[in-house]
Image: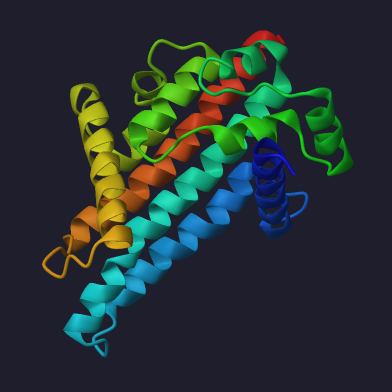
Amino acid sequence: MKPRDKQINSMLFRILEKQSRHLQNKSRWQQFYRRIVPLIRALNTVVKDRSIRPETRRELIRYFPIATVAFLEGYYQMVYADLVNSSRQRATNAAAIVDAKLSIGDVFSLQDKSITIGEWIAEKLPHNRLEDIVRNMNILIGRDNFFTEIMNNRWVTTIFQSSSNNQKFNVEALLVETFRLRHIFCHELAPKECPQIKLIYDSCFAALCLACATEECLSDSMRARNP
């Protein structure tokens, strides 16, 4: 088997595995919500349960940035796939981000395994940082600054109750720091690094409001295309 064919088969296998772990007949938002809300409840338990030893609590706290970023990555991968599948123009836009060239054989492989073009492209898109997500969304939906636009969303205003000038800074700073902590706790020992409880709380809510605002932004976009 040629190296390219091995790479494609490996990617198809990863996509199929992810499909098997998703809930059937549930929207991307429902699946994200089913993870982020229990995560916030778990954080409450870890913080308030006085029977947990301090060193154990510190170690458990380190898990939350990892989970928060994992949920965002999984959610946005579904967003990318849905956007690409919804419009040929968006599929064309995605070609500006990744090498998504497919042969006839590749297309047949996707069809045989019930994998959409959107899922294929979403698997190739980078989203290891907040900047990656913003860049992907800007290109896919044809915006100049997707993040700035959704920071004016009512979810951001309601959850953070801050002025318009501070919304972007607050949410962006929280999410950037969450991605940074995820990288540290996944790839380093970092025994001295333990984030403040308030930062962890706020970052979970930042992820929640980012997904909420994204859903509303995409709904508005669909309504504009289909009045």
Q: Quadrant of the C terminus?
A: top right
Residue at 47%, 25% (x, y): give it: 136
Q: Residue at x 27, y 68 (%)?
A: 61
Of 92 and 4, nearer the camera is 4
Which residue is found at the position 55% from the left and 50% from the top? 32
Q: Where residue 147 sits in the image (x, y, percent)?
A: 37, 24
Location of residue 51 in the rendering, given as x and y in whole percent from the top left corner? 26, 90
Closest to the observer, 20 or 213: 20
The answer, for residue 177, to whether it is visible in the render is: yes
Residue placed at 26% from the left, 40% from the top?
Answer: 176
The residue sitting at the bottom extreme is: 51
- Single out the residue that lies furthest toward the front: 1
Horizontal and vertical percent for residue 34? 57, 57
Residue 161 visible (yes or no)? no
Relative to 111, is 221 on the left or the right? left
Q: Nearer the viewer, residue 95 or 160?
A: 95
User: Which picture quadrant has residue 64?
Assistant: bottom left
Compared to 40, does 51 lie above or below? below
Q: Is residue 187 above or below residue 6?
A: below
Name the image quarter holding the N terminus.
top right
Count up the numbered dots.
0
In which quarter of the view is residue 197 placed? bottom left
Report the coloring of the rendering: rainbow
Q: Quadrant of residue 9?
A: top right
Residue 31, horizontal then vertical, whole percent: 61, 52
Residue in the foreground of this view, choosing between 92 and 198: 92
